[in-house]
Image (spheres, rainbow, N blue to C red):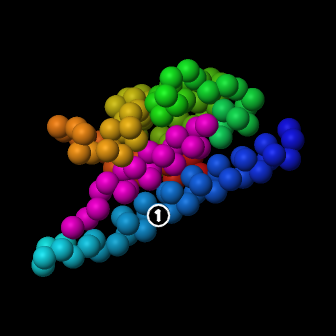
Amino acid sequence: MTNSNIDEMSLMFEAARSLIAGAKIVVASDGIEEEGHMRHPTLPVVVCSALAIEIQLKLLLKLCLLARPSGDGHDLISLFEKLPPTLRAEILASESAALNLPTDEIRMKLKANAHVFKTWRYPYEKEMLQTEPAFLVDFAIVLI
């Protein structure tokens, strides 16, 4: 590894850590008051969490000296599946222990949320949006 790789990996880690920290701040807040109503901003939590997961998976691929999968680079399940089987198993075991969910369910939820960053960053272009913000936040935190 060259120094530029170490610097890039450090920046990737810090970007992912900062994104999930921002999402946690929003989650922990009391919301935003608008016209006498409290609003809880789901959009930044979802986008920040999904991007944090994406960056962390790309960082793991880089650490494993593996190329990113072909495609647009935002597909979480494609990035995850490109990791070595032993690392995938370790991640699933850690996520399972932390989230108290079976590994099959975690994989299913990751697959269901594979394109969340792409769909949620421009929500006005979609007729309907679906995701599980709590899963995304928790998955990203465990990866950190």
Q: Is the N terminus in the top left, top right, bottom left or bottom right quadrant?
A: top right
Residue at x-position 77% and y-position 51%: 7
Above or below, 23 against 81 in this view is below
Asked if residue 50 is among those painted magenta in the image, a careful observer would answer: yes
**Residue type pointed to by label 1:** Gly
Disc 1, SS: helix
Image location of residue 53, percent across then percent down = 51, 44
**Residue 56 left/right relative to 118:** right
Image location of residue 128, percent across then percent down = 19, 38
Question: Where does label 1 land, which residue?
Answer: 22
**Residue 101 left/right relative to 88:** left
Residue at x-position 53% and y-position 35%: 92
Q: Nearer the viewer, residue 13 or 100?
A: 13
Q: Nearer the viewer, residue 73 or 76?
A: 73
Tell me where the magenta segment starts and ends, as one range: 39-58
Asked if residue 93 is among those painted magenta in the image, a careful observer would answer: no
